[in-house]
């Protein structure tokens, strides 16, 4: 060992060995080619199909204003629906005489069992 390499730690000695080795460029090119091959054979889709189960709940409330529908129907129903397992988010729209709630389930939740719950 020379004086310069004796002061280096283990990572420095490994780096020095690779700098002086004629196989280093071959290893680098091989790694690059394997990476390009991996990119080429990895399957991909431009527009993958992701199924997100959603459901609409419409609640009529004849004669009520939008504010009454929101306070008496939409907000309490949002809270109850959000307690169901697998639900990601609940959106609601209150109109005079009607509340429309949209329930969004987590990705991967089966449609039929989710709608029955």
Image (cartoon, helix red, strand yellow):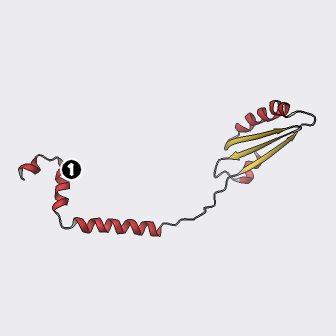
Q: Nearer the viewer, residue 89 or 94?
A: 94
Which residue corresponds to the image point at 23% horizontal and 64% vertical from the top-left? 24
Q: What element carries label 1?
A: helix
State left or right for residue 99 relative to residue 23. Answer: right
Tell me where residue 48 sits by quadrant: bottom right
Which residue corresponds to the image point at 18% horizontal and 50% vertical from the top-left? 12
Q: Residue 23 location, x and y as percent?
A: 21, 67
60 in relation to 33, above or below: above
Query: Which image quarter holds the C terminus?
Result: top right
Disc 1 target residue: 11
Q: Residue 60 location, x and y as percent?
A: 88, 40
Q: Residue 22 location, x and y as percent?
A: 18, 67
Which residue corresponds to the image point at 17% horizontal and 46% vertical from the top-left? 9
Quick one: which residue is furthest to the left in this view?
2
Tally of numbered discs: 1
Which residue corresponds to the image point at 52% horizontal and 67% vertical from the top-left? 43
Quick one: which residue is furthest to the right in this view?
63
């Amino acid at each position: 060992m020379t004086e310069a390499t004796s002061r280096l730690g283990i990572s420095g000695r490994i780096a020095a060995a690779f700098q002086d080795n004629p196989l280093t460029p071959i290893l680098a090119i091989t790694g690059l080619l394997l990476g390009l091959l991996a990119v080429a054979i990895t399957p991909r889709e431009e527009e993958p199909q992701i199924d997100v189960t959603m459901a609409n709940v419409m609640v009529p409330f004849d004669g009520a204003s939008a504010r009454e529908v929101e306070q008496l129907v939409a907000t309490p129903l949002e809270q109850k629906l959000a307690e169901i397992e697998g639900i990601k988010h609940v959106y609601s729209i209150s109109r005079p005489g009607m509340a429309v709630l949209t329930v969004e389930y987590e990705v991967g939740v089966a449609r039929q069992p989710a709608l029955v719950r």
